[in-house]
Image (cartoon, helix red, strand yellow):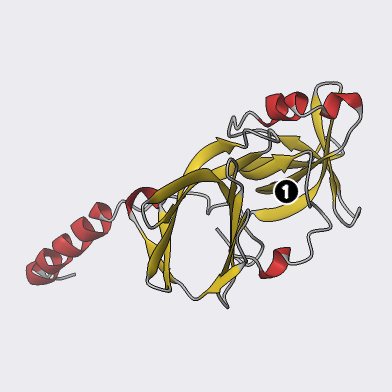
Amino acid sequence: MRRHPTLLLLLIPLIAGCQSLGWKDEAPPRPTERLQGQLTVIDGQLAFRSCQGERRLRLVDSIDSGLLDDALALGSDTGTPLFTDVRGVLQRQNNEDRMELTRLYRVQAEGHGCDAPDFRQLLLAAHGNEPGWSLRVTREGMLLERMDHSPLALPYLEEQLPGGQTHFSSEANGQQIGLWVAPQRCVDDASGAVSHLTAELRLGDDVLRGCAYYGGARND
């Protein structure tokens, strides 16, 4: 059989190129799901029941979010259910339904939880204390509410910033309004509720700080 040196020389770069690609048999990322529901601590374990009562899971804090300590601080060991909003990987192990957490959005003992009327339409909610303020963002606009002020509905621009920060800005009657949120654990100093974003609201020269979380209309 005749050999073809030219053909062999042509195949060498092709083989080397395939090797340089570094193909690996890596498992694809496991799909995650976001759930809201009631949280209780039972024998040191995090027990979760979805808002519709259809799912009962054990939450596994695989990201060391401190959820167990937060739940205890909010009184869940006394039998009082807390509201929590989490994302994670669902699995069944040892005849038990579990969720390995990949993100804790919030956990709280007070306020709207499963009965929040507009959660599915909400992109982001932020609030702070002393003085009290809240800002809710949807695809239609944002609503700013402050003590001793009338509610203010505004259009807005959204800008993604380095480090995972997001900036929402608007103008009303010549006054510039800006909200900065950053991915950092935040504890409400009045209620003790924990959320996954810090917030800074700037109204002209005034700077107000608080906490924030993504709503159900944002898949982050």
Q: Residue at x 14, y 62 (%)?
A: 13
Q: Is residue 13 visible?
A: yes
Q: In this view of the protein, which residue sits in the foreground, 4 or 152?
A: 152
Q: Residue at x 76, y 29 (%)?
A: 74
Element under label 1?
strand
In this picture, residue 56 sits left or right of residue 179: right
In this picture, residue 34 sits left or right of residue 95: left
Which residue, given by chain and number where applicable, does mark 1 sit on?
A: 90
Residue extending farthest to the front is 148
In this picture, residue 206 sits left or right of residue 147: left
Q: Position of residue 204 (x, y in %)?
A: 38, 58
Instruction: Give above or below for 47 relative to 83.
Output: above
Q: Position of residue 94 (x, y in %)?
A: 83, 35
Q: Position of residue 109 (x, y in %)?
A: 79, 38
Q: Residue at x 43, y 74 (%)?
A: 173
At label 1, the amino acid type is Leu
Instruction: Give above or below for 48 relative to 135.
Output: above
Q: In this view of the protein, which residue sits in the foreground, 31 or 15?
A: 31
The quarter of the rendered structure image containing the C terminus is bottom right
